Amino acid sequence: MLAVLESAANAFALGDRFVDRLVGDFTDDDWAVRDAAGHDPRWILGHLAAVRTRVTAMMGLPAIPAPWATAFGRGTSPADLPADLDMREIIAAFHAAGEAIGGGWEGLTGEALAAPLGRTLPDGSDTVGGALRFLAWHEAYHLGQLGIFRRLAGKPGLA
């Protein structure tokens, strides 16, 4: 693996190990807890799973089926989520993408990382490599939100 990817690879692997501890014991009521802005943990985790499916595409890996992914894009809200959303399916997709991502780091070359992304991310990244590093941070940010939702649901914190 290229050294520039090590921290991103470690961050995605940590997310895979940590997400079940954050939400594995959530009940239907826990998934419905909302913060003051109206967000809920279903949207946060679905957003992360959807982003991970896009990360696999950036890495040139086979697609992870995610017919629900558009409901979790930027600018969407919990009101946009399908009524029959099964969080077990979302968690399974999160892990499936994580497994694919974990196996894909070795195949990335400097040339692949330097490829233009086609847009600029909030941190200024505009290459595939920059996007992978930014999205590792992005995932950690949202995992932190899930930790807050865990406490809002009355569950003990993990850290």
Image (cartoon, grey):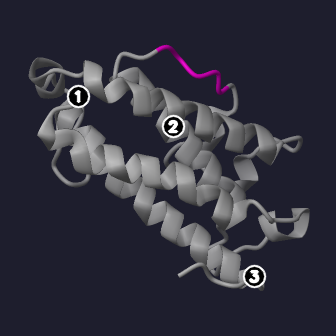
The magenta region covers: 62-66
Assess whether mark 3 and mark 2 are in contact (beta carbons under 8 angstroms).
Answer: no
Q: Which residue is mark 3?
A: 155
Q: CA distance from mark 2 to mark 3?
A: 26 Å
Q: Which residue is mark 1?
A: 117
Q: Is residue 4 above or below residue 142?
A: above
Compare marks 1 and 3 and give the one earlier in the sequence: 1
- Give the amino acid at mark 3: Lys
Q: Which residue is mark 2?
A: 98
- Give the amino acid at mark 1: Leu
Pick the front one: 149 or 3: 3
Could you tell me if residue 116 is visible in this image?
yes
Residue at point 49%, 37% (across, down)? 52
Q: Is residue 41 above or below residue 47?
A: below
* Predominant SS of the magenta segment: loop
Secondary structure under badge 2? Answer: helix
Q: CA distance from mark 1 to mark 3?
A: 39 Å
Percent coordinates x, y for residue 51 in the rendering: 48, 39
Residue at point 16%, 25% (across, down)? 116
Pick the front one: 100 or 33: 100
Residue at point 34%, 23% (across, down)? 59
Q: Nearer the viewer, mark 1 or mark 3?
A: 3
Secondary structure under badge 3? Answer: loop
